Amino acid sequence: MTEILWHGRGGQGAFTAARLLGDAYSHKNGAYSLSFPSFGPERRGAPIRAFTKLADTPIGNRSEIKKADYSIYLDDTLLDTAAFDELKNGGRLLVNTSKKYDDPRIVAVDAGRIAREVLGLPITNTILLGIFAAVSGEVSLDDVAYAIKRNMPKKLHDKNIAALSAAFREVGA
């Protein structure tokens, strides 16, 4: 099973991205996913976490992820050294940031810049999905585009698909 932990702030779309990833993965024959949020009565802007589990067999474990294969940060202000504690051996951090890191476990991409250029808004969730697709190989761009078309209003399809494609190219895939 591949486990993905999403970090964001209320209103940034972390849970939406978790659900889109699950849908992108599970539409393949013999694939299963589980996506769920972890938040309470927090307000917009408060830190939240969401989870996505991907597997080729039915997923029985519905608990929160403690150690992830990928931990994705929509907001780099949430990133601290404890982030490495939540990774499995060989795990990776995907971070929306303009900072540079000299650590092979960190994939840092200025998703905010891509969002402003492509979407005209500072919404980075589909951009991080494109980065995840490029880095993980778990889903293709076509898989994620499929999920966007199934789950987002039609007026958002073209820009979000362009945003995830731009992110995929940015990582060099």
Image: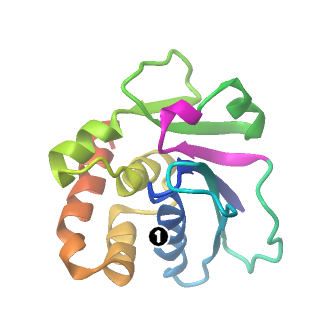
Which amino acid lies under the numbered mark 1 shown in the image of this protein? Leu
Please provide percent x and percent y for residue 156.
23, 71
Q: Which residue is mark 1?
A: 20
Res 12 → quadrant: bottom left
Magenta range is 67-78
- Quarter of the image that includes the N terminus: bottom right
Q: Is residue 128 above or below residue 106?
A: below
Drawn side of residue 157 relative to residue 146, left or right: left
Q: How is the image coloured?
A: rainbow
Residue depicted at 65% across the width and 69% down the height? 36
Please provide percent x and percent y for residue 136.
51, 50
Drawn side of residue 49 relative to residue 24, left or right: right
Q: Nearer the viewer, residue 144 or 18?
A: 18
Residue depicted at 19% across the width and 76% down the height? 155
Res 65 seen here: yes
Q: Is residue 11 above or below residue 153?
A: above
Residue depicted at 67% across the width and 58% down the height? 2
- Quarter of the image that includes the C terminus: top left
Please provide percent x and percent y for residue 25.
52, 71
Res 172 seen here: no
Drawn side of residue 16 relative to residue 35, left or right: left
* 102 drawn magenta: no
Residue depicted at 55% across the width and 78% down the height? 26
Q: Nearer the viewer, residue 153 or 138?
A: 153
Number of disc labels: 1
Element type at mark 1:
helix
Please provide percent x and percent y for residue 8.
54, 48
Neighbours of disc 1 within 10 Å: few (<14), some (14-19), many (20+): many
Q: Nearer the viewer, residue 166 or 120?
A: 120
